Image (cartoon, grey):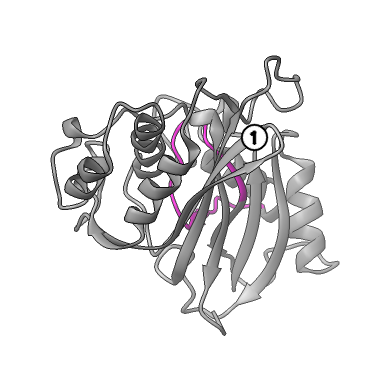
């Protein structure tokens, strides 16, 4: 049987979602916890690969288990409470449900939503510090909003893609992108049909340059025509980024 999981994690101490040979990743930790409950090795396929230090509030994943693999008591009890018993506090399965055998967490995703948090407080409290990045002073938020509006639509995001990604094309469709001010935080929210490796952090770093007066809106428009990565701004720090949710078409 196939099951879909909703997973949240504090990525501070992990090398991203995807299992790696030389570093501890979230996928490995989740797979080991599932194996402890199911009594067999299981591959847990995530909807997207988050980089080292990036968090998730709504990572989606799927796994296949033969009938009878889970202890009696129901899917939710085994795949939520049972698996969480074997997970560190920084990783939690929030929900689990049975899905059709054709379901694939990555291939069936219709769009993903990421959020990035900057904080303008002179002193950042320790409860937020792992998840926000100090905001540069004297940011022009209106210019940053204008820059983000240019990102919406279908573009070639080569300038914002980290080298080494497994993408077949660098063209993506962005449905929503914008900066908002919420209390002492400045937040970026972006939703799209897919994201290249490092793309959101590069978008944040580049639009921040607009807010600092170091880059024009015309330059942003040019970057969206498939320019080399070196022409865009730096990647913003990983800890400010969170995969907020993954959406699926009705019935998936």
Q: Position of residue 52 (x, y in %)?
A: 46, 31
Asked if the magenta segment contains residue 42, the reply would be yes
- 251 relative position to 18: left or right: right
Q: Mostly what secondary structure, the magenta segment? A: loop
Instruction: Describe the element under mark 1 as helix, strand or loop.
Output: strand
Pick the residue in front: 172 or 122.
Answer: 122
Pick the residue in front: 70 or 63.
Answer: 63
Picture layout, residue 235 above or below residue 126: below
Which quarter of the figure has residue 185? Answer: top right
Q: Residues within 10 Å of mark 1 (few under 14, many from 20)?
A: some
Q: How many marks?
A: 1
Picture layout, residue 16 above or below residue 155: above
Which residue reaches farthest right? 73
Residues in magenta? 39-57
Query: Measuring 21% from the left and 45% from the top, which residue is drawn there?
Result: 218
Q: Position of residue 110 (x, y in %)?
A: 45, 71
- 62 relative position to 149: left or right: right
Q: Position of residue 243 (x, y in %)?
A: 54, 48
Picture layout, residue 130 above or below residue 64: above
Q: Label 1: which residue?
A: 185
């Amino acid at each position: 049987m196939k099951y879909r999981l909703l997973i949240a994690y504090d990525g501070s101490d992990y090398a991203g979602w995807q299992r790696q040979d030389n570093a501890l990743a979230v996928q490995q930790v989740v797979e080991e916890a599932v194996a402890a409950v199911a009594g067999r090795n299981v591959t847990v396929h995530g909807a997207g690969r988050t980089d080292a230090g990036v968090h998730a509030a709504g990572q989606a994943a799927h796994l296949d288990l033969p009938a009878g693999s889970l202890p009696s008591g129901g899917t939710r009890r085994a795949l939520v409470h049972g698996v969480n018993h074997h997970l560190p506090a920084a990783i939690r399965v929030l929900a689990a449900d049975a899905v059709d055998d054709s379901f694939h967490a990555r291939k069936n995703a219709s769009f993903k939503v990421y959020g990035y948090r900057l904080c303008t407080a002179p002193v950042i409290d320790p409860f937020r510090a792992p998840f926000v990045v100090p905001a540069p002073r004297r940011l022009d938020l209106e210019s940053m909003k204008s820059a983000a509006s240019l990102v919406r639509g279908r573009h070639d995001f080569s300038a914002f893609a980290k080298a080494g990604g497994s993408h077949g094309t660098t063209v993506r469709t962005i449905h929503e992108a914008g900066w908002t001010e919420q209390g002492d935080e400045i937040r970026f929210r972006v939703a799209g049909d897919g994201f290249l490796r490092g793309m959101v952090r590069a978008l944040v770093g580049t639009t921040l340059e607009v807010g600092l007066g170091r880059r024009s809106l015309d330059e942003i428009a040019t970057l969206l025509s498939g320019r080399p990565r070196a022409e865009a701004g730096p990647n913003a720090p990983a800890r400010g980024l969170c995969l907020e949710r993954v959406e699926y078409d009705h019935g998936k």
